[in-house]
Each structure stands twice: as C-alpha cells, then as structure tokens.
Amino acid sequence: MLKRFTITLSLILISLISYCQTLSDQQRKDIISDLQKQITIVSAFSSEKLDMIPVYNSQLLNANKTLDKYETYKSDNLIYAKWFELKTLVKQNKEMVNFLEPRVGDWFYRKAVGFVANNEKAKAVEFLNKALVYDSKNVMVNYELAKISLDSGKIVGATNRLTNILSQMQPDEEEKLLCQNLIAFAYDKNLLKSLSLINQGKYAYAVDILTELDSYCQADIYGICNKAVIKKNLDFCKTGIYNEHITVSKKAMEIGRSDVAGDFVQNTYDYFQRNRQSITDTTSFEGLVRGVVDSYIGQIKNLYSAKNNEAKIDLIRKTKELVALVGGEYEAGVLKTLASMQGTTTPVDMKLDSIENAAPVEGYTHQYAQYVKDSISNAQEKVKEIEKQFIPSSENKLPEKSLAVEQTKTKSLRKEIDDKFYESRTFMTVSNYDKALEVLEKANRLAKIDAEKQEVEKMYTSAIREITARRMSAAEYSIFQGDVAKADSLVGITNDLITTYKMQQDPTIINIMNSYLRVIDQKVCQKKQDEIDVFVYNILDCVRRNDFYRADELITTAMQVKGSSECRLDKQKIRQLKRQIEKPLEYVNKKEVVMKNLENKDTLLFIKTYAELEEFWNDNKLVEMSVEHLPLRKILYNTNNSELVIKSIEEMVKYRLYFGSLEALGALKDMGFKRKQTKDAQKKIGMMMSLDVVNRPDKIRESNLIDDKFKNDKWFKDFYKSYNKYLISWRKNN
C-alpha cells in the first residue's frame, strides 16, 4: 500500500516538474506583467470618486477574467504571488463598490445641491441627471431639476416634472406640499415677471413667458391658473408687438426707406394673421399700406427709361402684393392705376392679337365638351367628394359607391352569378378593369330571369362609374407629374369606355367627367402659364444678348400657347417685351441695310444710311437697352479695305460729315497708316471743319469736343493744328 502511494506521488511530482519546465521565462514574465497591470488598476480605486463606480465595476470584471485566465499557473511561485495579490485586491474593492453603489445617487444629489448653493447651475444639472441614472424616481432630484428649469424660464417643462412627481413618484406629505408650493410659486413668479416686462414695453419677452404659462394652464389640475388674466395679457402683448411693427415701418417711411417699410408691412401682416384673435384694430396697418403703396407708385412713375424696366416690373409686383393685403375697392383702384401706367390693361397689338386668335383652342374641357355641362364654382371640392365615393385609399378602404359596396347590396342570386360579381370586384381591387368587365359579361350570359339581368345591369353601371372615377383620378395625377401624354391616354380610353357602354347621359358619369375635366384643365392651364413664364425668361435672355430676331420668334411662339376657353393665360409680359424690342428690332433691320450697302461698296449710300442709323440709335436712347452699336471707325476697320475707307472719307467731307470723316481717319490709323501719309487730308478736314458756318454755341461745343478727343492724340496733330489755326479766322468773321 505504501509502495503504491509512493509511486503515485512520484508521478505527480514528475508531472509538475514537467509542467513547470514547459513554461518559458518570457511566458512567465508576460503573465506576471499582465497581473501587475490589473493590480495597478484595481489599486487606484477610491471611495472618494463615486462617479467612477460604473468604471470600477467594469475594471473588476476585467480583473476577474484575468484571475480565471491564469489560475492554472498557480504552481509557479512567482505567478502565484501576483495572482494572490490581485485576488485579495479584487475582493476588498468589490466589497467597497457593493457598499457604495446604492449610495451613488444620493452622493450625486448632495454634490448637485452644493453646486446650486454656489450658483453653478450647469454643473448642478449635470450631477442631478447623473443621480437620475441611479434612481429615476428620486423625488428631490426631480424637484431640484424643476427648480432650475423654472429659473431658466422653462415653466411648462418644470411644471410637467412637478406634476409627474405628484402623480407617479408617491412623494410623502412634505414632498407633496413642497412640489405644490413650487408650482404655485412658479406661476406667480413668472406672471409677475411678464407684467413687469409689459410695463417696460418688452412685449416679445413677455409673450414668451405668457405663452409658457398659457400652455401650463391648459393642463392645470390644481386650479392655480387664472386663464382670463393670461389671455388678456397675451392679447395686450401681441397688440403691442403689432404696434411696434407699425412704428418701425413708419420710421422707415420717414427716412425715405420705403423698401424697408414694405418688408415690415409684409411681416406685420403675417404676424397679425397668425394672431387675429388677439389683434382686432388694423386701421393703422391699412393706412401704412397706403403710404408705402403711394411711395412705390411715385417711384414707378420715375422709372420711365428702358434700362429701368426690370426695376419697374419688380416694384409693380411688390405694389400688387401689398394692395392685396387690404383688398376691396382700394385694391381695384390701385390695380387700375398700375394698368394705366403700364400702357393699358391688356396692351393692344394687332399683329400679336391675330397670332393669338389664329392659334387653336386646346384643353380637355374643349376636347370633351359633351361632358362639360354644369358650371362648378369649385371643381376641386367636387373631385374630393367623388374620390370619397369611388376611389379607395389607406384612409378610405371601402368607398361608399364602389363596386365592392354595391355587390354586398345584391339580392339573393344563384351562386354562379354571385361568384362572378365577387370575381369582378376582386379584379377591380387590383385595377384590372378589362378583366372585371369581362367577368361581368360572363355574369350577363348566366342571367336568365329579369331579376338576375337587373342585378347584372346594376353591377355594370357601378363598375363603369368606378372605373371612370379611378382613371380620371389617375389622369389628374399624371398631369401633376407632368406626364401629359399619359393623361391624354387615360382620358381617351375613359371616353371610349363610356361610349362603348352608352353611358354618356348618365348623371353620375357626367358629374365625374365634368368635375375632373375642369380640375385637369386648370392644372394644364397652370402648366401653360409656367410655359409662358419660361418664354419670358428666354426672351429676356435674347434681349441681353442683342439677339432681337430670336426674341421676336419666341414672342410669336409664346402668343400661340393657348388653353381651353376657361383658361386665362397672362401674356402681358410678352406684350410688354414685344413693345420693348420694337425699336431695337427696327435698328437691327436698318443696320443690315447699312452693312449691305458697305458690302456693295456703295460708299455714298453707306455713309447716308449709317448717319440715319446713328441718329435712330441716339433718338431712341437704345444705349439704355444695351443695344450694341458699332462705331463707324470699327466698321470701316473691319472691312480691311483702305481704298474703301479713303473713298468714304472723301464722300463724308463732300457732305460736311466731318466727325464721320475723322472716324474714318481713325480706321486708317488702326490699319497701320502713318500720320504723314494722311497729313494733307487732316489739314484739309481741319480747315473745312473750323471754317464751316454754324452758330456760335454749336461751334463752342464742337471745339470742346475736338479738344477732348484729339488734343492729346499725336496721330491727329496735323488736323488739330489746322483746326485751331482756322478757328481764329472763324472767330474774327463771326
């Protein structure tokens, strides 16, 4: 027996020695290092840092995992020493954490109270919220948060928290009284604060507080609020804010800033629209609108030149928006005034009128006039009613007049026919209308007696009505998406269906088609108006690029855009642009004639027509329209024909067009001619120009102009000397 025990012990010792031998020095060192790392972490635990408790729990968990990991290496004395040290520290600190953890919330609360005492509210809120993590129903923590919210003016949030304490947290009698008193104090304090702000004229600040109080009063379960007082002061503040708007607008008018006043008027209107129940007297507002409008009209009258056309249109738009705020006869009068200032209400242009009249009328109400029977004041409302009756949706799963409802009303029929009705209803549900009607045809063939035939007929009628409503609804949506082709197709096949089943005179069908056709027509009309607006933009772009021919083409095309007889398109801007480009277009035509004469080398006719062109450009102030006008010098230089330029100079001198001849001389200069090559011509022009018989004021202007243009130009030195030399003779004789 002893011998067997000795052998067993020897084997165990051999195994241990073998195990220890398999652990290298580096492995032992790594294990000890890992254990030491955990010892260092756990040793740093402190009972003073309660906010670290969650972290301590996590660190203890990691330490225990390390202990479990290296438990098999305890046979190594060095490892075991560290392992045991860590285990002891974990046990001691776990006891500390278990003791402190239930008390962390109270510790956070006490810290927060200290911050409150030192008026460090941000820190206090931080620690109170930490306390709530440990106990969300701690009455005093919630109470302190409510107090801080009240100090920040958050009345509703604070009172909601206090109400929550009273209703859900089961406070004791003292805590309950504390919360109730704080609610009453909050109400009184903030009401007094709002009244103080009102006395100071700080209505906007008072409104914020009173709005908070009013929100609390809606759920006041303790009878603290006086709703009448809150409402009275809210109305008073809103009226005060409204009056401040008026005052600012008037001051802007007094210093000549009608643009600022106009913006304030719009803001004022928006404000009192939102607060109509509080603000009753709007007399001052209407007077202010009239003042701003009068100022705008005065400005519009002064913007008569073409270059101010965009600014004028913008002011007219603003004026229309402002008078719409007052409405009535005043609006009508101002609109009439604006129309007269723009020319006429609808500018007359015989050519444009004939283009517009020749364009075919387009639109669904025109194309399907057989359904447009009754006049409808509000077709959109009718459509909503039809949708409720026939078209299923997530809110209206079983429309009241759908085939599904009608099928439930049928009398007791043979199962075969009833099944067909149900099958047809199923196909309608998935919008397979052709199949639904095909199944009804089968039901019709099954019907043998009058009762069955009547029920099938009733199903036909119901199905056609529902299909009509659904397809017309889909057509309306297609127009909304901009897919006009799809809408055309849907309306067309709907009409074919109605015709096939001879239901053109059915009152319900007529009502559905009439309503939808008008609504769709209105939407198409709006899209056509958008199309007109795009034309306006493109025409303006052409005008900016001096492409007046293209602008005229676009105007002609825009005038051909037409809707149905019920579609009123506003083409006033197109007509204005037509009048705006008339003179530039005439200028372009004249310019082409001038350039053609130059190409034909008809110098005399070129000079004559160019002089007329320049006079036309100046008389019509086309520079304000940014119409490009090439100077004579530039045109002649572009010909690159010196002989033609010299001939032009001779012709202009012959007809006493001296400034034109000087421009032509400038073209020779640009071509590279030297001054001495034109010396004789310069002297001759200088002499003839200075001795030309004109009245004294014109001669003075001419002399000043020559000084400005040629005095410092050395190339024209001979002309300038000759002119001044003979100018002395002219003065003696005149």
Image (cartoon, rainbow, N blue to C red):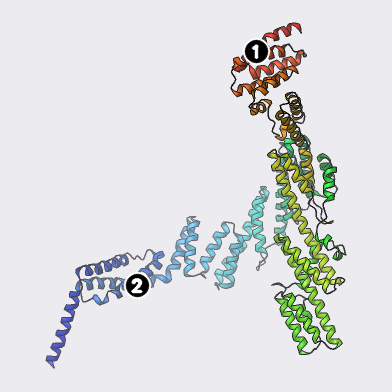
Q: Quadrant of residue 718?
A: top right
Secondary structure at badge 1 equals helix
The residue depicted at 26 percent of the width and 71 percent of the height is 85
Which residue is most to the top? 732
Q: Amino acid at mark 2?
A: Lys
Q: CA distance from mark 2 to mark 1?
A: 117 Å
Q: Are marks 2 and 1 in contact (CB under 8 Å)?
A: no
Task: State the image coordinates of residue 619 (x, y, percent, origin top left).
Answer: 77, 28
In the picture of the structure, the residue carrying the numbered disc 2 is 94
Count all numbered tags in the image, as a single digit: 2
Q: Nearer the viewer, mark 2 or mark 1?
A: 1
Q: Nearer the viewer, residue 358 or 308?
A: 358
383 displayed left or right of 260 = right
Q: Image quadrant of residue 523?
A: bottom right
Q: Secondary structure at mark 2?
A: helix
Residue 252 image offset from top left, x and y in percent: 71, 40
**Residue labelled with disc 1:** 680
Q: Residue at left 81%, top 40%?
A: 342
Disc 1 crowd, CA 10 A, few/some/many (<14, 14-19, 20+): few
Q: Quadrant of residue 697?
A: top right
| Earlier sequence position, callout 2 versus callout 1 | 2
In the foreground, 419 or 685: 685
Tell me which residue sits at (76%, 46%) in the image: 322
Q: Amino acid at mark 1?
A: Asp
Q: Position of residue 397 (x, y in %)?
A: 71, 75
Determine whether, in the image, residue 110 is placed left or right of residue 193.
left
